[in-house]
Image (cartoon, rainbow, N blue to C red):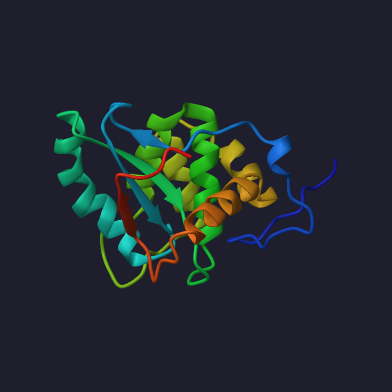
């Protein structure tokens, strides 16, 4: 019986990762009516401010979303602050691929801690959060360890670069839809 190689977490980027052409076409995670004013939120799961956004600002935005005034689009804008930035973003996209956009939003809120100074992530936290929202933790583990959705996150970073942000999270109101 062959023993599987154990990968340390957070896993380092392998030499080869799938290209955009090899991946499912995942939509930019969006919540709200299509004709509402777009609010694009650029975030990095590895920063403490991302958790604050999901627990403090997002609930206030939900009122506007449910009233049909705005729609929120999540954009990855990972910065090299934490080792977990890419793995958490990849895990979120893995959940999205399995469960759709509602799964993405449920995972994003639950995986982000509310406290400061920095999020405390672990392999168990990521996989148990995926399982809690209904995704396969085994699939998330495989996707994170292979950096499966890296190309999607890189595409999001290129999109964010047009704005030349000083930090994350940052919101852009009234533009977007790319």
| Image side of residue 22 versus residue 120, left or right | right
Q: Quadrant of the N terminus?
A: top right
Residue 147 x/y as whole percent = 66, 50
Toward which corner of the image does residue 66 lie, by quadrant?
top left
Q: Is residue 107 above or below residue 155?
A: above
- Where, by quadrant of the figure, is residue 168 drawn? bottom left
- Residue at the right extreme, as displayed: 1
Question: Is residue 35 rendered to the left or right of residue 149?
Answer: left
Observer-nearest residue: 40 or 105? 40
Residue under the image location 38 percent in, 50 percent down: 111
Instruction: Report the front residue among 54 and 122.
Output: 54
Residue depicted at 79% across the width and 59% down the height:
15
In the image, residue 38 lies at what x, y percent? Answer: 31, 40
Tell me if residue 113 can be seen.
no
Please tell me which residue is depicted at 38% across the width and 69% down the height of the picture. 167
Kindly tell me whether residue 146 is visible in this rendering.
yes
Q: x%, y% of residue 40?
A: 35, 47
């Amino acid at each position: 019986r062959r023993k599987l190689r154990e990968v340390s977490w957070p896993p380092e980027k392998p030499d080869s990762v799938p290209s955009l052409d090899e991946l499912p076409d995942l939509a930019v995670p969006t919540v709200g009516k299509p004709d509402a004013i777009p609010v694009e939120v650029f975030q990095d799961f590895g920063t403490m401010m991302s958790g604050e956004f999901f627990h403090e600002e997002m609930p206030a935005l939900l009122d506007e979303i449910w009233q049909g005034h705005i729609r929120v689009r999540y954009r990855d804008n990972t910065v090299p602050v934490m080792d977990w930035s890419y793995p958490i973003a990849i895990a979120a996209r893995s959940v999205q691929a399995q469960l759709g956009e509602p799964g993405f939003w449920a995972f994003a809120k639950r995986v982000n801690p509310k406290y400061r100074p920095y999020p405390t992530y672990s392999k168990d936290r990521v996989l148990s959060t995926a399982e809690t929202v209904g995704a396969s933790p085994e699939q998330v583990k495989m996707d994170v360890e292979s950096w499966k959705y890296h190309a999607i996150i890189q595409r999001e970073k290129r999109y964010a670069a047009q704005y030349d942000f000083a930090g994350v999270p940052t919101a852009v109101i009234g533009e977007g839809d790319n």
